[in-house]
Amino acid sequence: MTIRAAAPLAQETISYNMPAFRSEKVLVYYMAHSRHIGFYPTASPIKFFKEDLKNYNTSKGAIQFPMEKPLPLLLIKKIVKFRVKENASALVKK
């Protein structure tokens, strides 16, 4: 619901065998693992929100949200909105 609120026109899809939301291009992927929820918004939001993500394990294109803690819904919403703007900007440049 958080992703849908941030990107109401996005469509749910499966890509690389993972659930994802797309709007022209994929916005974010996500996947439940045994100890965390993997959230895959690509590399640029991870760099942009580096300070907000300092308490989470991250890699170039992934964020791990521990299962035992509540999801940071406001942060997820910000990241999705960032990706929506990023995709829209890429379309304008074409």
Image (spheres, rainbow, N blue to C red):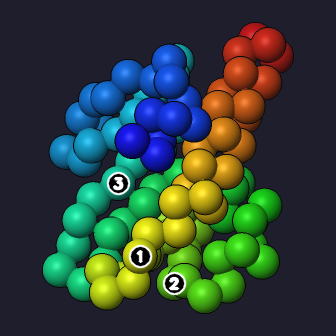
Which badge, 3 or 1, is on the more N-terminal residue? 3
Label 3's element?
strand
Image coords of residue 74 (percent x, y): 61, 58
Q: Amino acid at mark 3?
A: Tyr
Between disc 2 and disc 1, whose residue precedes?
A: 2
Q: Nearer the viewer, residue 77 or 20?
A: 77
Give the spatial CA distance, label 2 vs label 1.
Answer: 15 Å
Does the image show residue 43?
Answer: no
Q: Helix, strand or loop at disc 1?
A: loop
- Residue 57 bears which disc, if any? 2
Evaluate if marks 2 and 3 touch, with contact meaning CB atoms under 8 Å apart.
no
Instruction: Give the crowd class for mark 3: few <14, some 14-19, many >=20 residues within 10 Å.
Output: some
Count neighbours of disc 1 (C-alpha within 10 A) and say few if under 14, some if 14 to 19, many if 20 or more: few
Q: Nearer the viewer, residue 66 or 91?
A: 66
Question: Residue 30: which numbered mark, if any?
Answer: 3
Q: Which mark is residue 70?
A: 1
Q: In the image, which disc is placed on residue 45?
A: none
Q: Residue at x 36, y 66 (%)?
A: 38
Q: Is residue 85 left or right of residue 62?
A: right
Q: Residues within 10 Å of mark 2 (few under 14, many from 20)?
A: few
Q: Quadrant of the N terminus?
A: top left
Front residue of 5 and 91: 5
Q: Secondary structure at mark 2?
A: strand
